[in-house]
Image (cartoon, coloured by chain):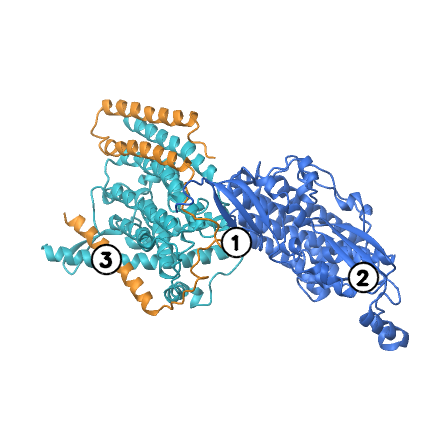
């Protein structure tokens, strides 16, 4: 008691075991009363060494590990990695694969944002929102399950295509989502946008200016909330995003409420993209024809000697991309998710490095919360939308 | 009636009321979980007994069997005392609530109220505001920072709403001219005499302040689970925690009972027996509480204080003035 | 007096109930404390510093305001109950009193005492 008598501030650990730090994030808060004087995020409690482990794995065996980074958006992680390796190999995807990937990653964006809006509202005390959001997310997880057999760690995208062809009722399910979710989004907005308490908890909280956001190299909704128009899908199109008609919502004030509005709008835009992609999806193969790199069709493996050998060799030895290094970024639900892969010509990546949007966005946390109240820390952590699996990798 | 008879009747009434309150608290938790479940497209408890009706009993048994973990650096005496200080005042406020009219039983005229104090309303307000001591003691003596923050928040919150809470019923008192709960019920004999119609602003103020006083959503900052983990009772487990828990629900029930008595005509109603009417009104009020919890986000601390001092308090004062003027002129 | 007697009985029954449940629970519950378990909770990290610190004096000021206004509000109770019997004089007097209260509130408000943070 005596040694602290002269001290005016209190140091408080928020996390790693805390209900609202979205996993095992630890924020060391220095509090004066309830005002945050200093906030220091500590990470690493969920470190799994994915980047290092990738160096000892065949290329295709890295895909399941990427699922486990941002476990709320597995398809986006798969896509980033597959695109990077395909870039390294110089593979060109068939139309059907591209469209299927676009549909599934946009659905992933919706699923991830749904979890976000649910947990964010829960952090602010609106507990029902979580269950509503999970109800809708369930429909998307059902599609994952129909496609890949897995609800969360789907590992559906493969280097050179998809793991299997899309299920027969894929179109029906997606159309159902297109019909249901817009109405539900309206319900959410009635519950949150019109709520005075929600608005007063979020408007003007956790403000970050456009300049600071760029300097912190934020990306995704956190950056666009401050009014900076940067979306990898527009700035650096992949998967034929330049062919789709959609808008990038921008905020003005860079506060929690703007980030919330942007994510709500992004879900609508994603639905627009899904609709266009579903209408434009041509029939065709679900894998590119690339002997020795991409697995041959199963019936060929069972009937043709050559295919069987390729199959065996790919599974056991993998493939050897040429020497070189690539960087491929995609717009994941959290922001710019980039994969840097350097190849030394062997069948394993020489080095893999992920640009994790959550981690980099998290670095703006002290900027946003210092000088504000403790309750705002929760709102801001929620609004950054971190997934600790991706922060720590 | 002789002295012994009075003692005996009082004791029986006390025991009946205590049991009723405990059952009421237990089934309030059931009601809350069931209602919130349905609000959220879930089923709620449905395994223990039909409709999960035995769930509160299962919870109670679990809590009794739990290990009591006492952290090392607590202030032992206050730490042990705090749950009791929360629980007892919550219970005591039921002493002056009339549950029904006079009944004749075994040749005795029995009032359906433990104690018809002529200052009943004042007693309720005095006793319910004692609960804050338990919360502050719990928060401070636990030696945990989350508890401390919860305790301090709670005290500041409760004192901020205490003033408006007291003022909110002065309008009723001006009209009624009595502090006796029984007398208040008697003055609301017909439906449109209910004080909710004669004092609508007072009722709204009362409800808001009561929610804040009982630390319930959207004013549940002292235990805001997403910020302070569990607030002032973070370090409590087993039966000690259960005391806080029962205390909170007993407080909610007490507030509902008082609201029913003061504003909603008490036990009066057609056809059904008085005690049933009373229970229905209290249950409806409790459901309103739960509904709020399922719907609203939590206020932030400064917003809460601003709302209490800058909106509710002036409004309550104005309500008193306007009521007095209308009544006089 | 019997009315207060009933309340005292109520009080004792309440305390008895609490002590009984504590006693009952002590009989049947397990007790297995060890250092990690009996550490204060701070999100699974060892606590940094003591929690008994000088706290921000904001809270103290609010307590002072509360004492002032609550004591004044108490005067309204007897006035309200006796309102029917009192004449116009009481009404006017109380109006002045309430105006003084409101004035005090706005004074505190303008002084910035009611501002949190």
The reply to whether label 2 and label 3 mark residues of one chain is no
Is residue C108 found left or right of A198 in the rendered image?
left
Report how far apart the C-alphas of labels 2 and 3 lie in the structure: 73 Å
Q: Which residue is mark 2?
A: A159
* Residue A202 percent location from the top left of the image: 56, 40
User: Does B161 sit left or right of A298 as displayed?
Assistant: left
**Can you see residue A195?**
no
Chain letter behind tag 2 = A
Q: Are marks 1 and 2 in contact (CB under 8 Å)?
A: no
Q: Which chain is cyan?
A: B
User: Badge 3: few (under 14), some or many (20 or more) residues near its Cα, within 10 Å?
Assistant: some
Colour in which chain C is drawn: orange
Residue A302 occupies which quadrant of the picture? bottom right
Tag 2, which secondary structure? Answer: loop
Q: Is residue B158 left or right of residue A116?
A: left
Contact between marks 3 and 1 (CB within 8 A): the answer is no
* The color chain A is rendered in: blue
According to the image, label 3 marks what residue? C13
The residue that disc 1 covers is A18
Q: Which x, y percent locates residue C30?
A: 38, 69
* Mark 3 and mark 1: Cα distance apart in space: 39 Å
Q: Nearer the viewer, residue A57 or B186?
A: A57
Query: Quick one: which residue is furthest to the left in this view?
Result: B2
Could you tell me which chain the residue with mark 1 belongs to? A
């Amino acid at each position: 008691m005596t040694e602290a008598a002269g001290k005016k501030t209190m140091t408080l650990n928020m996390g790693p075991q805390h209900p609202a730090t979205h996993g095992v994030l630890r924020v060391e808060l220095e509090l004066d009363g309830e005002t945050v004087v200093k906030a220091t995020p500590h990470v690493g409690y969920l470190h799994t060494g994915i980047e290092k482990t990738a160096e000892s794995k065949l290329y295709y065996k890295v895909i399941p590990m990427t699922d486990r980074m941002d476990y709320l958006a597995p398809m986006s992680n798969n896509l980033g990695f597959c695109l990077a390796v395909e870039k390294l190999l110089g593979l060109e995807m068939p139309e059907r694969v591209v469209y299927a990937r676009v549909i599934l990653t946009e659905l992933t964006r919706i699923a991830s944002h749904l979890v976000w809006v649910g947990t964010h509202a829960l952090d602010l005390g609106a507990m029902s929102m979580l269950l509503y959001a999970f109800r809708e997310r369930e429909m998307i997880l059902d599609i994952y399950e129909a496609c890949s057999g897995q609800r969360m760690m789907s590992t559906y995208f493969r280097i050179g295509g998809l793991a299997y062809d899309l299920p027969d009722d894929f179109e029906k399910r997606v159309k159902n989502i297109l019909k249901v979710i817009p109405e539900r989004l309206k319900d959410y907005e009635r519950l949150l946008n019109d709520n005075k308490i929600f608005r007063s908890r979020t408007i003007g909280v956790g403000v970050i200016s456009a300049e600071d956001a760029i300097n912190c190299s934020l990306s995704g909704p956190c950056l666009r909330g401050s009014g900076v128009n940067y979306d990898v899908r527009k700035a650096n199109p992949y998967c034929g995003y330049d062919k789709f008609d959609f808008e990038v919502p921008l905020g003005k004030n860079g506060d929690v409420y703007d980030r919330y509005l942007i994510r709500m709008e992004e879900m609508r835009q994603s639905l627009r993209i899904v609709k266009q992609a579903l209408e434009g999806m041509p029939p065709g193969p679900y894998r590119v024809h690339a002997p020795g790199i991409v697995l041959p069709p199963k019936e060929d493996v069972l009937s043709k000697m050559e295919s069987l050998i390729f199959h065996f060799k790919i599974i056991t030895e993998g493939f050897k991309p040429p020497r070189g290094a690539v960087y491929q970024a995609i717009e994941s639900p959290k922001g710019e998710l980039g994969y840097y892969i350097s190849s030394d010509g062997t069948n394993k990546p020489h080095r893999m490095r992920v640009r994790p949007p959550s981690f980099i966005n998290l670095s703006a946390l002290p900027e946003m919360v210092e000088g504000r109240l403790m309750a705002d820390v929760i709102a801001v952590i929620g609004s950054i939308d971190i997934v600790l699996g991706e922060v720590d990798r | 009636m002789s002295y012994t008879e009075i003692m005996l009747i009082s004791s029986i009434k006390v025991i009946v009321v205590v049991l009723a309150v405990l059952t009421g608290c237990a089934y309030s938790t059931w009601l809350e979980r069931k209602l919130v479940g349905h609000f959220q497209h879930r089923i709620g408890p449905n395994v223990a007994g039909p409709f999960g009706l035995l769930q509160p009993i299962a919870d109670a048994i679990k809590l009794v069997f739990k290990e009591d973990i006492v952290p090392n650096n607590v202030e032992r005496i206050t730490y042990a005392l705090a749950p009791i200080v929360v629980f007892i005042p919550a219970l005591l406020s039921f002493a002056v609530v009339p549950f029904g009219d006079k009944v004749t039983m075994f040749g005795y005229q029995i009032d359906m109220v433990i104690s018809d104090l002529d200052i009943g309303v004042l007693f309720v307000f005095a006793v319910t505001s004692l609960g804050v001591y338990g919360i502050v003691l719990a928060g401070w003596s636990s030696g945990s920072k989350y508890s401390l923050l919860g305790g301090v928040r709670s005290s500041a919150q409760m004192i901020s709403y205490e003033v408006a809470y007291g003022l909110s019923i002065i309008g009723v008192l001006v009209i009624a001219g009595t502090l006796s709960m029984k007398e208040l019920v008697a003055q609301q004999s017909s439906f449109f005499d209910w004080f909710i119609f004669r004092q609508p602003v007072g009722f709204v103020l009362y409800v808001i302040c009561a929610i804040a006083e009982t630390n319930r959503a959207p004013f549940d900052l002292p235990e805001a689970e997403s910020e302070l983990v569990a607030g002032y009772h973070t370090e409590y487990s087993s039966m000690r925690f259960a005391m806080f828990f029962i205390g909170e629900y007993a407080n909610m029930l007490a507030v509902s009972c008082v609201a029913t008595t003061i504003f909603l005509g008490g036990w009066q109603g057609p056809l059904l027996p008085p005690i049933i009417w009373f229970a229905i009104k209290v249950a409806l009020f409790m459901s309103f509480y739960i509904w709020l919890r399922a719907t609203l986000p939590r206020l932030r601390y400064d917003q809460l204080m601003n709302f209490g001092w800058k909106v509710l308090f002036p409004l309550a004062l104005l309500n008193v003035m306007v009521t007095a003027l209308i009544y006089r002129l | 007096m019997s009315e207060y007697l009933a309340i005292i009985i109520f009080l004792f029954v309440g305390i008895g109930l609490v002590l009984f449940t504590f006693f009952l629970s002590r009989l049947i519950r397990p007790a297995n404390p060890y250092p990690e378990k009996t550490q204060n909770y701070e999100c699974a990290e060892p606590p940094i510093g003591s929690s008994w610190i000088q706290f921000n004096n904001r809270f103290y000021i609010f307590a002072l305001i509360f004492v002032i206004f609550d004591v004044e509000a108490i005067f309204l109770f007897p006035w309200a109950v006796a309102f029917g019997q009192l004449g116009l004089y009481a009404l006017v007097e109380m109006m002045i009193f309430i105006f003084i209260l409101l004035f005090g509130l706005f004074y505190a408000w303008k002084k910035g005492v009611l501002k949190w943070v």
